[in-house]
Image (cartoon, grey):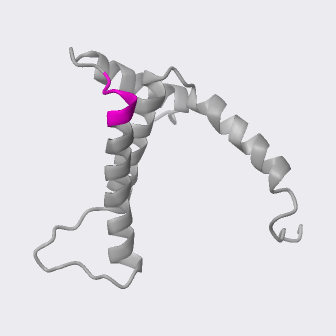
Amino acid sequence: MKEKTMKDIQKEVDTYIGQFKEGYFSPLAMTARLTEELGELAREINHRFGEKPKKSSEADKAIEEELGDVLFVLVCMANSLQIDLAEAHDLVMKKFAVRDRDRWTKKEEL
């Protein structure tokens, strides 16, 4: 199976959302949803790696699924705002390459 590009992912989400009359939520509503999904991810991380074990009555959720939820909402937001996430990623990587060039200790080359 061919690996999906970010453009593929954005198109897949757009096709999915496009089948509904309601379309994308407003940016404010999606920000709230992104915050909610990030909270669910944080909860799962805390249960697995932190000091707060789950209650026996709580269902297991995979961190992978929670990351997928965050990605889905992020893609929805980008699509609704007509932002190409691959281009946004490139902008951020250029920023880090300049701003953080000497911030971290680099590994020695082999």
Residue 86 falls left or right of residue 105: left
Q: Quadrant of the C terminus?
A: bottom right
Q: Residue at x 71, y 36 (%)?
A: 91
Q: Quadrant of residue 41?
A: bottom left
Above or below 100: residue 17? above
Q: Residue at x 41, y 78 (%)?
A: 49
Q: Quadrant of residue 44?
A: bottom left
Q: Where residue 61 sits: x, y (%)?
A: 25, 62
Residue numbers of the magenta segment: 24-29
Give the residue at the far front of this rendering: 28
Q: Residue at x 32, y 35 (%)?
A: 29
Give the residue at the far bottom of this rendering: 51
Q: Quadrant of residue 79?
A: top left
Above or below 34: residue 79? above
Q: Nearer the viewer, residue 90 or 80?
A: 80
Q: Residue at x 32, y 67 (%)?
A: 43
Task: Count every numbered label the image shows and give the total.
Answer: 0
Residue 5 falls left or right of residue 71: right
Q: Quadrant of the N terminus?
A: top left
Above or below 64: residue 54? below
Q: Nearer the viewer, residue 71 or 32?
A: 32
Q: Where residue 89 sits: x, y (%)?
A: 64, 38
Is-magenta flag for residue 109? no
